Amino acid sequence: MAETGLGKKDIVVDAGTGAGALACALANVCKHVYSYEIKEEHLKVAKENIKRLRLNNITLKKKDVNKGITEKEVNLIVLDLPEPWKTVKSAQKALKIGGFLIAYTPTIIQASQFVEEIRKNKSFLFDKTIELIQRKWIVDGRRLRPSSAEIGHTAFLTFVRRIK
Ligand SMILES: C[S@@+](CC[C@H](N)C(=O)[O-])C[C@H]1O[C@@H](n2cnc3c(N)ncnc32)[C@H](O)[C@@H]1O
């Protein structure tokens, strides 16, 4: 959200929905989220979570995102699925020029394969791949030091923009 400057006029496509956690976080900030998911049981869980959070700006879609994105002039597409390189062509048709395509991948092999596909497509410009890790500190009297138990890995975030 910070990197893309996502705001309340923006339309977002999210795939796959999973439990809907990312879709809900995005919906708190943007105008509308269209979230694609292939598994009915995951959509059920996401629907419950959206209801609990009383969000009315998320549309859940039971559809393979690689087979086409219906929405056009989308500001941001976020992919959290195993093979994001397969979504590049659908994303190209749906994103507005200047829009962001972001892939969240647990391994750097997935990030690399995604970037290779992006580099074959002249409509996209690869920006960066980053890894975010927060280090929690103990702040308790004279015990002022990093916590012993640390998160060793989160995931890689790859940022791409549609340029034409
Ligand atoms: C890691 S989960 C996503 C978690 C989600 N971001 C969240 O916050 O809960 C990946 C999801 O992608 C779905 N998926 C995989 N391939 C897909 C595709 N081609 N189109 C739509 N959904 C897909 C899977 O069924 C799974 O629910």
Image (tube, rainbow, N blue to C red):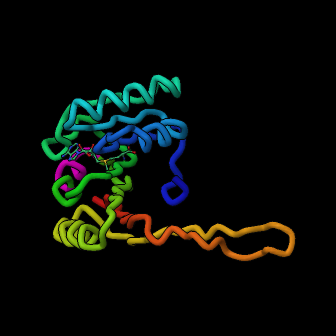
| Residue drawn at point x = 29 percent, y = 44 percent | 15
34 magenta-colored: no
Question: Residue 149 versus residue 104: which sits nearer the camera?
Answer: 149
In which image quadrant can residue 98 be found?
A: bottom left
Q: Residue at x 69, y 69 (%)?
A: 137
In the rendered image, the vertical position of residue 67 relative to residue 85, given as above or below: above
Q: Residue 162: image x %, image y %?
A: 31, 58
Location of residue 143 in the rendering, given as x and y in whole percent from the top left corner:
79, 74
The residue positioned 19% from the left and 35% from the top of the image is 63
Locate the C terminus and report the quarter of the image it occupies.
bottom left
Q: Which residues are magenta?
A: 88-94
- Viewer-proximal residue among 150 and 105: 150
Q: Quadrant of ligand 1?
A: top left
**Which residue is drawn at the image coordinates 35% and 28% (left, top)?**
59
Instruction: Examine the image and state in which quarter residue 121 appears.
Output: bottom left
Looking at the image, is 76 positioned above or below residue 120?
Answer: above
Q: Is residue 154 left or right of residue 81?
A: right
